[in-house]
Image (cartoon, helix red, strand yellow):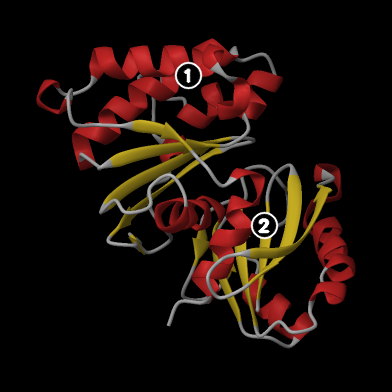
Amino acid sequence: MILGVEIGGTKLQIGVCDARGRLRKLARVPVQRSAGRAGILRQLAELIPPLLPGVSRVGVGFGGPVDVVRGRVVKSHHILGWSGFALRTWFEREFGLPVTVENDSHCAGLAEARLGAGRGKRAVFYFNVGTGIGGALVVDGKLYQGRYGAAEFGHLRLSDGRTLEAVASGLAIERGVSTVAQAGRQVGAMLANVIALFNPDVVVVGGGVALAGEKFWKPLRETTRRLVFEPYQRNYRIVPARLGESVVVVGATLVAGEP
């Protein structure tokens, strides 16, 4: 069995999956952002031990860019205290098991590509619109990786210099920077660019904002249709994610199970 951990900007999730990614146990608690890194580590130290019997390794999906090779956090855009933190070292010291650390959207994208809405497709682009905005490119069942990850969809820039995350994420909506419909239009425009760049078989959209229904999806689809590269107008698909809130946990166990 493999333990999967999601460290997000809104919630922590810890689950146990078998080698095929089937979820057996799950715990979920809200994150107290004001407590910073130290508060989250305390929560993990309390929540994880009861789930460890029978577990052989751990996968962690972290909400921000990570150095996968070294198992270090590069940066969190939502919680203070994480920059440069040796997350893999902390987990291995605390729980005595081998640990793999990956970006949370990469975990979710891998899960959706292998087990969810992208199953059976060669090239899958995944993105989530939640507290922040992230993405993943999965080709032939494998994550595309740069030095510190890749497909940071939320940090594509608008013409005024702001990032997509700054104007279309759940936090942006919560702070009154935009509405759900405006977020849908902004995301749709960026998706047209992604389709022009990668021409994926399918684009899978997840995250809490994507659960807002047609007030998000209608402007997204209309904007993408209007702006997408004309030769690709008939061969792209945009679909909702299928695996629900546990997707990062499941994906983290898949990453940890990689040879």
Q: Secondary structure at mark 1?
A: helix
Whichever of callouts 2 and 1 sits on the residue coming sooner in the sequence is 2
Q: Does 184 appear above or below 244?
A: above
- Disc 2 versus disc 1: nearer the observer: 1
> Mark 2 — residue?
6
Measure the alpha-carbon separation of dots 2 and 1. Answer: 26 Å
Q: Does 238 appear above or below 42?
A: above
Count of labels in the image: 2
Q: Is residue 38 left or right of residue 216?
A: right
Q: Is residue 100 visible?
A: yes
Label 2: few (<14), some (14–19) or many (≥20) C-alpha neighbours in 10 Å: many
Query: x, y percentage for residue 187?
Result: 43, 24
Q: Are marks 2 and 1 in contact (CB under 8 Å)?
A: no
Q: Locate the N terminus and report the quarter of the image it occupies.
A: bottom right
Find residue 217 and name its label: 1
Q: Does 31 appear above or below 15?
A: above
Which amino acid is tagged 2? Glu
Of residue 203 and residue 37, the one placed in the foreground of this image is 203
Of residue 110 and residue 78, the one placed in the foreground of this image is 110
Query: x, y percentage for residue 7?
Result: 69, 55
Q: Is residue 99 left or right of residue 258?
A: right
Q: Is residue 206 left or right of residue 39?
A: left
Q: Residue at left 50%, top 40%?
A: 241
Q: Residue at left 51%, top 58%?
A: 107
Which amino acid is tagged 1? Trp
Q: Is residue 86 visible?
A: no
Q: Quadrant of residue 221?
A: top left
Query: x, y percentage for residue 114?
Result: 41, 58
Q: Residue at left 60%, top 64%?
A: 22
